[in-house]
């Protein structure tokens, strides 16, 4: 492995060839390969065989539009990209299963599993980071999982249902579905995107909790005000800002109480006021140990 020293900063730089990929970049590469396999076998073309011309055209257009959207999202990681791949990747599994296309089904399942890994999610949200930020995605609260799945299903059924019913000139059901799709497209995508915009940020000066699902305002805790950092199994007497997750969480204890403003839904769930003064609180990064090591208290 070859290294050289940067003359201006005196830092060791990895000059090995080919350059080493980060774990997140490796997972993106794996997903891209799987996605290319889907693009080669094009299960949406298979589904269109034997269908009427309007339905076949709709399948082909939707299939390639969604395939291209995921490909671009993988090449340009960001929180928005995370929302795009999470919303579309299950459709690839459904499409491949309906087409009875084994290679596409295997590739879509690989993509679906890899895209939900904690390492890849951190890589996606890090794509939108500024300066020296190091972002760690937060786990989805359990109470929000079922509503998110139902909202996603409603969006998919209304959008694609209206497309195919109108393509077959079944106006009596296609038109109401189109109206429902118009409403769903205005509301649901931004709600689903909020799940991808939840992260713990480690910066040289301290930590920032960006979670507008659970918190009304971003929490900023300077490093010199953090007394301790530990992994806990239960929320104990600390304020629970995880939104309700199972398993371990990160316990942050402050040297003095700080004001935290909760979202309305969190305040109702906890049965408390929206503004709290807390000395310690819990959050739940997907990669707890990595986040704890990055803060290095």
Image (cartoon, helix red, strand yellow):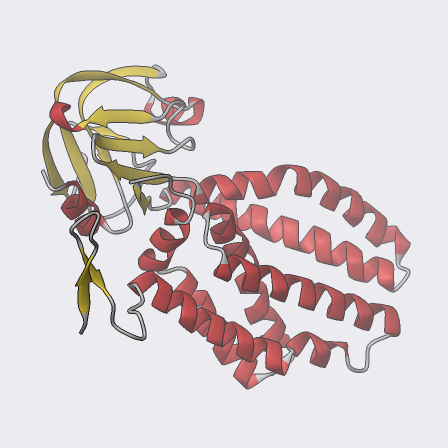
Q: Residue at x 20, y 52 (%)?
A: 7
Q: In this rendering, is residue 273 above or below 136?
A: above
* 231 vs 16, nearest the viewer: 16
Residue 254 makes an appearance in the image: no
Q: Is residue 12 left or right of residue 169?
A: left
Farthest front residue in view = 7
On the rendered structure, is 264 left or right of 190?
Answer: left
Say whether residue 278 is visible.
yes
The image position of residue 278, as x and y in percent, is 20, 19
Question: Residue 77 or 103: which is nearer the viewer?
Answer: 77
Q: Looking at the image, which residue is at 45% across and 70% down? A: 31
Q: Is residue 190 left or right of residue 276?
A: right
Residue 295, given in percent of the width and then of the height, sits at 16, 40
- Give the image quarter of residue 214: top left
Screen quadrant of the C terminus: top left
Quarter of the image with the N terminus in it: bottom left
Residue at 65%, 54% in the rendered image:
156
Percent coordinates x, y for residue 246 in the rendering: 27, 46
Indicate the quadrant where residue 256 lies. Answer: top left
């Amino acid at each position: 492995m070859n290294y050289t020293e940067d003359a201006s900063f005196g830092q060791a730089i990895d000059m090995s060839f080919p350059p080493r990929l980060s774990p997140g970049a490796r997972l993106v590469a794996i997903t891209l390969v799987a996605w290319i396999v889907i693009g080669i076998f094009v299960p949406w073309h298979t589904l269109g065989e034997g269908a009427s011309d309007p339905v076949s055209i709709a399948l082909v257009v939707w299939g390639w539009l969604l395939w291209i959207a995921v490909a671009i999202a993988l090449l340009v990681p960001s929180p928005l990209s995370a929302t795009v791949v999470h919303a579309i990747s299950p459709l690839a599994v459904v499409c491949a299963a309906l087409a009875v296309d084994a290679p596409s089904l295997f590739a879509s399942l690989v993509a679906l599993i890899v895209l939900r890994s904690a390492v890849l999610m951190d890589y996606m949200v890090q794509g939108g980071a500024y300066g020296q930020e190091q972002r760690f995605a937060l786990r989805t609260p359990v109470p929000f999982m079922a509503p998110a799945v139902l909202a996603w299903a409603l969006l998919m059924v209304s959008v694609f249902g209206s497309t195919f019913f109108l393509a077959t000139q079944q106006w009596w059901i296609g038109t109401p579905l189109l109206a429902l799709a118009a409403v769903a497209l205005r509301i649901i995508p931004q709600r689903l995107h909020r799940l991808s915009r939840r992260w713990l940020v480690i910066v040289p000066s301290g930590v920032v909790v960006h979670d507008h699902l659970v918190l009304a305002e971003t929490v900023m805790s300077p490093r010199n005000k953090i007394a301790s950092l530990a992994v806990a199994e239960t929320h104990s007497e600390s304020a629970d800002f995880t939104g309700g997750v199972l398993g371990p969480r990160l316990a942050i204890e402050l040297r003095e109480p700080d004001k935290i403003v909760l979202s309305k839904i969190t305040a109702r769930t906890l049965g408390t006021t929206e503004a709290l003064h807390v000395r310690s609180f819990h959050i739940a990064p997907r990669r707890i140990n990595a986040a704890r090591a990055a803060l290095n208290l």
